[in-house]
Structure formats: structure tokens, C-alpha cells
Image: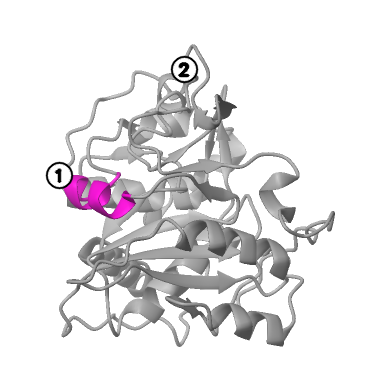
Amino acid sequence: PRCKLCSRLPRTLAASGFAVSLTTSDPHCAINATLTSLLSHLEQPPDQPSTRVILHVGCGANTTSEERNALGRLPRVTLNPKCVHVTAGDGSILLAHLLNVRLLATAPPQTLLLASADMRWIASGAEAAAARRVSSAIGAAWIELGAAVAAVAPRHRASFDDAAMRWAVGAAGRLVVQKHEGSFYPWDVLAAFHDGLCAAGALPRLPARRAVHARPVLWLAPEETLLPSFAAARLNSSGPRASSVLQLDERLADGVLCGFGMRRRGGAWACPRPIGKRCVGSTVFARKAEGVEAHVEGCNGAVPPPHQHSLFR
């Protein structure tokens, strides 16, 4: 079904600057800690637009209207007035980011970086790194869509290998799987991706799209397959071909600006030795938090709300 959000984004305004799309369903105290970490490392250059943060707070988040509005009054933060129930394992994360994309359309950035609630920023300079590389999808490893589908359980193949997926991978049929935390894309790619999903009526159905398992190790989540595959095809990326889903799984963090599995060493965050498969050192500006720290920092022991079923609202 089509929805009132499914209209083409305007193309009349020139894109400028850098923005971060953050979606979270954490309590107010944890969201505030995430934003504090993020804003402390974003640039405010005197001769160009400051980096902006577009905040989506999930409908099921343990926050009051007053708390949400207070978050939206933080410097350089815009609160999205619309929300979806966001949960891991389906397309609601991607839908939440696309709602932020839609909110940005009246004053689009040149580049948008996707951030998660459990990212903790450890260095400045993400804007310059993203400008140099254009998109995290450029140079990303890929595998033939058919090879990935063959590794998915037969009962899930039809829901994964559908019209939306074949549209995203393009004529070459190259599936790119890349962590969404710290991924970044130019505005024209995001606008074309949004409009294509709208035209196909697939945007409001994203929450019903489930992540599937490609044996033996790889999880294929909507936000980590549809968008990077579309971007790589549109940008004519020439990344390396993976020989198997196992090899592709080892390259999930390549290109993104967030490190996974990082550990504190000598007062600084770094990759353990030997470097793990999802820990990259040279382009990391944030790290993926783990355990309790990921969602309750600054909350005095509060626990995050339970995951809720995703319903578009």
C-alpha cells in the first residue's frame, strides 16, 4: 500500500553541508548521552554550514513529550515529529532513517551519515573523511545475489529475493552487505533510493521486511543490504568480489566510520591485536558500545524498554 509519505523528494534546493541521521528508542537520559558524545565531535566551521543532527525517537521509547521536545532544542539537533516503532531484525531501522531523509529534503546536506543509539564518538573529522570518500559503499565487497540467496533457508528466499532487492542490486546483481552504523551516502543517492522505494510502494512495508540468515554466519538486514547495494550500483563501485558469505561477513565494517569490537588500551580506544574481522583502525571516528553501556549510559542503572513490534504510524 502507498502512504502519504510516498511522494518524490524535491530537487530544487542545492545540497550543502553534512548531517547525521540518528534513530533511537532509548530512555531520555541515554539519548542525551548519545547526543552529547556526537555533538562534541561534530564540526562547526566558520565558513560553511555546521553539521546537523536529525533525531528520530522511536514511538515506543520511554520518553515524555517534554523530554522529546527538550532534545529537539539542543544546538544543531532537529527532532523528527514522526516516528515508527523501531526494533532490531526488521526494516523499521531503515524506515526511521528514511523519515529523517524526508525531513531533510527542504534543506538537504551533501552527505548524510547514519548513526545508531549505541555509537560513542571518539574522534573528530568524520565530515572530512566522508567528503574524501563520497560514500562508504564505494569499494565495498560484494557477492552475487544468487550466491547469497542460495545460503538463505529456502522458506525465507522469496521474502529476501523480491522485486525491491533486485531493484536495489541493479542489473549487475551485486549484493553489498555493510554495517549501517557509520555508513554515509551523498544526498542524490539517498533521494533516489527513497523515491524508488516510494514508487514501488515498498516504503511503508519496510517494517514487515525481516532480516534473514545466510549460512553459516551472515545476517542480511534491510538497512545493511538494500541501501548499500543500491548506492554501490549507482556510484559504479568496483569493490572486491567475495567468494562466499563467510568472506563477505569478514568485510562488514569496511568503509564505515564506526569501529566494532574496540577495546580501551592506554587510555585510548583501539582494535585488539590481532585485529578482529570487524574492527578497523584507520577510519574510525566512533565505536560500537557493548552490553549495558550501549543503552543506559547516564541513566543511573535504568533499563531500556523492551523491543516492540514495528508498526508504521
Q: Which residue is mark 1?
A: 236
Residue type for callout 1: Asn
Q: Nearer the viewer, residue 304 or 309?
A: 304
Give yes or no for contact between labels 1 and 2 (Cβ–Cβ under 8 Å).
no
- Establish if 129 lies above or below 141: below
* Number of residues whose C-alpha sits closer than 10 Å to that of mark 2, classed few (under 14), some (14–19) or many (20 or more): few
- Establish if 230 lies above or below 245: below
Q: Nearer the viewer, residue 249 or 311?
A: 249
- Along the horizontal axis of the image, is 127 left or right of 114? left
Farthest residue to the top: give it.
274
* Number of residues whose C-alpha sits closer than 10 Å to that of mark 1, classed few (under 14), some (14–19) or many (20 or more): few
Q: Is residue 301 visible?
A: yes
Q: Secondary structure at mark 2?
A: loop
> Residue at position x 38%, y 55% from top?
163
Q: Which residue is mark 2?
A: 275
x and y, in percent, of residue 36 in the image: 55, 62
**Quadrant the C terminus occupies:** bottom right
- Establish if 75 lies above or below 51: below
Q: Start and end of the magenta stretch?
A: 125-136
Residue type for callout 2: Ile
> Residue at position x 66%, y 72% from top?
311
- Along the horizontal axis of the image, is 101 left or right of 59? left
x and y, in percent, of residue 138 in the image: 23, 41
Q: Which mark is residue 14?
A: none
> Residue at position x 45%, y 48% from top?
180
